[in-house]
Image (cartoon, rainbow, N blue to C red):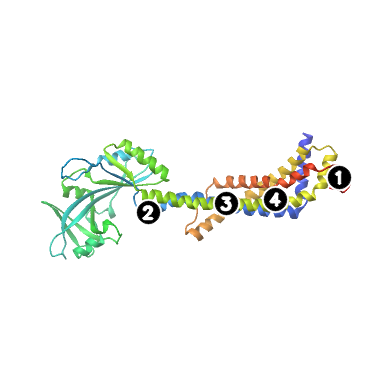
Amino acid sequence: MPDRKMFWRIVRRLFGAHHGRLLVILLALGAGAALTAALLNLQVDAKRRLTAEFRVFGTNVVIAPRETNTNSTAVATLDESVVQQVRQMTDAPPVAAVSYLYVVASVSSPNSNQPVNAVIAGKRTELIGRAMRKSAIVTPRGNQNLCAVGSKAAEQLHLQAVDRLIVQNAAREETCFAEIALPRGDAEDSQIVINLDAAQRLAAVPDRISLIQLSVTGTPPQIRKYIAALSQNIPAADVHGLRQFTDAEAKIYNRISGLLTATIALVLVLTGLCVMAAMTNVAMERKNDVGLMKAIGGATRRVLRIFLVEAALLGLAAGAVGAAIGIVLSIWLGKAVFGFAASPRLIVYPISVALTILVAIISSYPLRRLAGISPASVFRGEA
């Protein structure tokens, strides 16, 4: 107990001396901790942000009928119960499932001279999540009689907004009011999207769908695991992912993560060099103190332990303040550089503080030179 009291008394006295040197070390460690925490927070938040941004581009998993070798001219479809099988995967991430049924029908409008053949896409969107026992069905504006007409189809039919369309297939007929969609640059520009129930009545295939498109959240490995689970649960369907989305997402994140990791490593190395330079001067100034400690019986191991504890406490103090500033800084950096404010991640704080303490301890290596000091040479002025 007396040794422990003396140990901490010496540590407190060390903090009371050489204020200028200690302030330089604190500033270097604090700046390093702030930059480390800011970059780490941006790196962690980038994964969630990229996943959310890529989902804006559309679906990344498709469930389609398996190809058959029969010579039948009938178009392959899936039973609508497949959506229920997707819904029963309660351990899966939140999913937006879009069911489609495609049928070619003749379409006439008040401004067209004769009916025009067009691709009719029956569509239904269902939101499926972990906490949902039943999926929520989303209908456009709650109106079953609205249909979204692609820009090319609208031009071909000479449509104007809210024109009444008559869609016919054999003896079956459906009507809807047109909403002209903005150009997308894909196949939907030539399609007319109606409610799935109306498309099923038009094609005379109740409870059948052409395919299901899923928008699955998560990292590429999580999405691949989800696809494998779907394939196992729905053997009658062909489940595959859209590689251009998942692979592009993984590639972009790996590049951003690698760049931020390299920057963090560079910041820590530069911080360590600054602290090491300051510690070298501290070691030279403390030769007399170490000589006196050894002269009164202090073991070399205990003397070095005192300075290591001092370095660790400096790292803890600078890391605690610098990491908090860095997390706040990352919010501003995200908004200024990437256009969005990064969400604070609590895991970043202890990691940044731990890294700062580690850098402080490693940077105190010059203090090992004090271990070889002889008390006699110090008192004679030779050291």
Label placed on residue 264: 3
Label placed on residue 308: none
2 vs 4, front mark: 4
- Residue 180 sits above or below residue 300 on the image: below
Label placed on residue 377: 1
Q: Along the polypeptide, which appears first: circle 2 or circle 1?
A: 2
- Residue 236 sits above or below residue 322 on the image: above
Q: Which residue is mark 2?
A: 56
Q: Whole-percent x and y of residue 325?
A: 59, 54
Say which amino acid is labelled 1. Ser
Give the class, few, some or many, for how many residues have Cα within 10 Å of label 1's Cα (few <14, many ≥20). few
Taking depth in this image into account, of 350 and 24 the one nearest to the observer is: 24
Q: CA distance from mark 1 to mark 4?
A: 25 Å
1 vs 3, front mark: 1
Marks 3 & 4, CB-CB < 8 Å contact? no
Q: CA distance from mark 2 to mark 1?
A: 73 Å
Label placed on residue 276: 4
Q: Look at 32% across and 36% down and name the residue there.
A: 233
Residue 363 in view: yes
Q: Along the polypeptide, which appears first: circle 3 or circle 4?
A: 3
- Residue 140 sits above or below residue 114 on the image: above
**SS state under label 3:** helix
Marks 2 & 3, CB-CB < 8 Å contact? no
**SS state under label 1:** helix
**SS state under label 2:** helix
Give the class, few, some or many, for how many residues have Cα within 10 Å of label 2's Cα (few <14, many ≥20). few
Q: Whole-percent x and y of residue 122?
A: 23, 51
- Residue 375 sits above or below residue 120 on the image: above
Q: Along the polypeptide, which appears first: circle 2 or circle 3?
A: 2
